[in-house]
Image: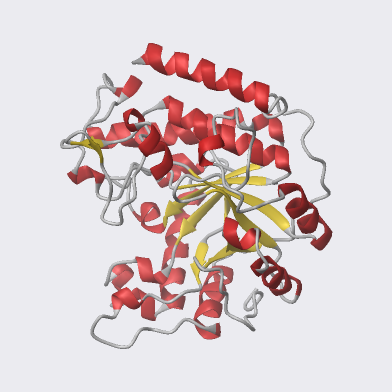
Amino acid sequence: MMKKILLNFILFTTITSLIFPYVMNGEESEEYDFTYPDAVRGIYVSSKAAGSERFNSLIDLIETTDLNTMVIDVKDDYGNLSFKVDKDSPYHSVATDDIPNPKTLMETLEKKKIYPIARVVVFKDSMLAKQRPDLSFTENGQVWTNKNGEAFVNPFEKEVWDYNIGVAKMAAEMGFQEIQFDYVRFPEGFEKKDEILQYSTGEYENLKMNNVKKRVEAVSDFVAYAKEQLKDYEIDVSVDIFGYAATIEEAPGIGQNFSRISENVDVISSMIYPSHWSNNYFGIPIPDKEPFRLVDEYAKVENDVLGKLDTPPISRPWIQDFEAPWLYTNGKTKAYGVEEVEAQIRALYKNGINEFLLWNAGNHYTKNVDYLIGS
């Protein structure tokens, strides 16, 4: 298995260095004049929005508020690359024209003084899983998918690591100032499937530890490896992580250890959407209905965890700017508007957390929010 991985990586490295001669050595990247803002206050922007007229309205939102940053898909939730590449590239089969002209995109962001962060979805990757079932999880000879029909690739496989780091290097060469890795984990509920699915554990096979610890090792090692591989690019590295991971020693199924991941990134972005916490977490009956209290309670825990690290990263949580109707099958959905978004922001500022990102999958953000309220 290791011989196969090594041969595949040599082929990948050779091809990529020929197609992207500057991507592999950290030299001659695009030169743009981006300055890290006083504090990042950003929004998520899908690749389709970034490459369409919708982009203009998102620029207007930033220019007319105290927002200053865009987190833009470079590799999306399905494993698609957001822009076209040469036909000989190892990414050609997953490349789209969602962003028709990346250079124009970056020039626009530079002109508008919008700080650019590249989102790279790592282990949720239906495209790569379909092409390479040996790098995924299979059941009865078929690639396993979750209840939403999404496939994951295997965090134990070093070839998967290098595949995603290759995308990150392209993003760095394009001019992005930070690489934000998302879905740095095993599938949710994997602890119930780990003895059923077929997959390789690679070099982790013979480690004297249980499956939970092996998953934590693989995920933590990927983050450390990615940081090392990107060190010559003079960019920041961040990771999105489940908020609840900060409240426990480690998330048993998905392999996320909050402290170990935080030790190897410049920025940690917990997804602390009130809608994503189970009822009675932190003693809050329905967290989605109490955004200030939820974020306030979470922030206290995170500050304690990060405070124990020698070199803690910047905390930059993802907060909620969307509604969660799936929580209210028997009643009226809790609306999320100015009051609810500002409540989360106030709770962060109260706890000394000055950076945040807003998530809305459709990129429709609440108007008239005071993004400095309580700062």
Q: Which residue lies furthest to the front in this view?
A: 87
Q: Can residue 136 be seen in this view?
A: yes
Q: Which residue is drawn at 53% across and 17% down?
A: 11
Drawn side of residue 113 relative to residue 280, left or right: right
Which residue is depicted at the point 24% across and 33% down? Answer: 211
Q: Which of 253 and 347 is in front in this view?
A: 253
**Quarter residue 214 falls in:** top left
Q: Looking at the image, is 245 positioned above or below residue 160?
A: below
Q: Where residue 66 sits in the image (x, y, percent)?
A: 71, 72
Q: Which of 111 and 253 is in front in this view?
A: 111
| Count of numbered badges drawn on the protein | 0
Q: Quadrant of residue 126?
A: top left
* Quadrant that contains the N terminus: top left
The single residue placed furthest to the bottom in the displayed view is 332
The image shows residue 10 at horizontal and vertical percentages of 52, 15
- Residue in the picture at 32% in, 28% down: 134
Quarter in which the C terminus is drawn: bottom right
The location of residue 363, given as percent across then percent down, is: 56, 68
Residue 355 shows up from this direction? no
* Residue 120, horizontal then vertical, whole percent: 54, 45
Q: Is residue 296 above or below residue 17?
A: below
Looking at this view, is 237 or 143 the one in front? 143
